[in-house]
């Protein structure tokens, strides 16, 4: 016989067993959960130990280990997000401070550096800026690029004061990445200018690249763009917001137009035809024209009435949505 650990099963053959099929189960008096099983058919002997309590403890240990791992992962992710948020805020402050330049600094730049400055402005704002970075963030970047393009030192300093609010204007993780790429591209143009006077352009370039790297890492809080519920009428380049007041005005105009069409058509119908015609073809032509005018007039009146009703329903719907 071999002595077995808990949860294992072994077999030891016996040579001196009877050929009669017998099966006996014996239990050790000291261990009610350890059983011995012997069978003359197989000629073997096995020892098994099943401990439900031990298995339950193993399952509890595994479950608690997984819970601790999930909690640790969530904590680490939250720490990374907080760290990158603080780093990004610090980078925004650095860029804002570096853009506060001496008086008429950008206006006094040599022609070659003015070209680099315009290239940086183009790299920051080219393409579908609003679609990639969001409407508000794109507007801020566009404002900054215009000050660089025009060489407006005072305007750049004024725009720099708004840069710390750029984090509040992000609408998605992808917009954060796009802002980062644009800042890095623009920063490379600034760092390529070399050492000029006190190295202000170099500081701006390094601050832009550092900010772009922080934005590209992601893990930044985003503000969902509000979904506009206003109804809009579009016809080519014309775009008009539909409000309840405008719907009521349209209904009134439709009613007036419908009444005028009805009155004019009724007057034409009631007018007797006393004209003299040269031949039968002229009579047929005049009759057909008269019928066409009457049909068109009544159709306009009915259409105006339907339009007025539809606009009144639309106005009531808009009012109910606001409530």
Image (cartoon, rainbow, N blue to C red):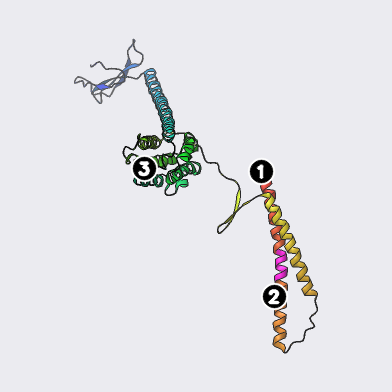
Q: Secondary structure at mark 2?
A: helix
Q: Are marks 2 and 3 in contact (CB under 8 Å)?
A: no
**Which mark is first along the chain, 1 or 2?**
2
Q: From the viewer's perspective, is residue 298 above or below residue 101?
A: below
* Mark nearer the viewer, 1 or 3: 3
- The answer to which quarter of the image holds residue 286 is bottom right
Mark 2 → mark 1, Cα distance in angstroms: 45 Å
Is 43 or 68 nearer to us in this picture?
Answer: 68
Indicate the position of residue 247 as horizontal and vertical percent values: 68, 53
Mark 1 → mark 3, Cα distance in angstroms: 45 Å
Does the magenta stretch mainly form a helix, a strand or a loop? helix
Please tell me how crowded label 2 is: few (under 14), some (14-19), or many (20+) other residues with Cα within 10 Å: few
- Disc 1 target residue: 322
Please tell me how crowded label 1 is: few (under 14), some (14-19), or many (20+) other residues with Cα within 10 Å: few
- Disc 2 target residue: 292
Which portion, as a residue range, is magenta?
A: 296-302
Residue at x-position 76% and y-position 70%: 264
Indicate the position of residue 309 as horizontal and vertical percent values: 71, 56
Q: Are marks 1 and 3 in contact (CB under 8 Å)?
A: no
- The answer to which quarter of the image holds residue 202 is top left
């Amino acid at each position: 016989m071999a002595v077995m650990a808990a949860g294992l099963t072994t077999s030891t053959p016996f040579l001196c067993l009877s050929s009669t099929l017998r099966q006996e189960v014996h239990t050790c008096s000291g261990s009610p959960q350890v059983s011995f099983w012997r069978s003359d058919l197989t000629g073997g002997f096995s020892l098994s130990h099943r401990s439900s309590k031990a298995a339950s403890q193993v399952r509890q240990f595994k479950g608690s280990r997984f819970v601790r791992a999930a909690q640790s992962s969530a904590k680490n992710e939250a720490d990374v997000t907080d760290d990158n948020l603080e780093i990004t805020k610090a980078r925004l402050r650095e860029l804002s401070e570096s853009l506060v330049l001496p008086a008429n600094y950008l206006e006094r730049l040599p022609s070659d550096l003015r070209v680099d400055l315009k290239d940086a402005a183009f790299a920051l704002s080219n393409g579908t800026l609003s679609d990639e970075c969001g409407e508000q963030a794109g507007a801020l970047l566009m404002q900054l690029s215009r000050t660089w393009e025009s060489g407006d030192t005072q305007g750049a300093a004024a725009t720099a004061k708004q840069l710390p609010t750029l984090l509040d204007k992000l609408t998605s993780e992808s917009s954060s990445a796009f802002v980062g790429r644009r800042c890095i591209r623009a920063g490379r143009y600034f760092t390529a200018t070399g050492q000029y006077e006190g190295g202000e352009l170099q500081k701006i370039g390094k601050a832009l690249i550092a900010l772009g790297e922080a934005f590209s890492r992601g893990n930044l809080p985003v503000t969902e763009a509000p979904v506009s519920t206003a109804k809009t009428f579009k016809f080519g380049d014309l775009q008009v917001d539909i409000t309840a007041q405008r719907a009521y005005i349209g209904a009134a105009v439709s009613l007036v137009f419908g009444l005028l069409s009805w009155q004019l058509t009724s007057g034409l119908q009631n007018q007797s035809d006393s004209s003299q015609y040269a031949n039968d073809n002229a009579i047929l032509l005049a009759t057909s024209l008269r019928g066409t005018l009457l049909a068109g007039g009544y159709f306009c009146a009915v259409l105006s009435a339907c339009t007025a009703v539809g606009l009144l329903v639309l106005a009531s719907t808009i009012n109910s949505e606001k409530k």
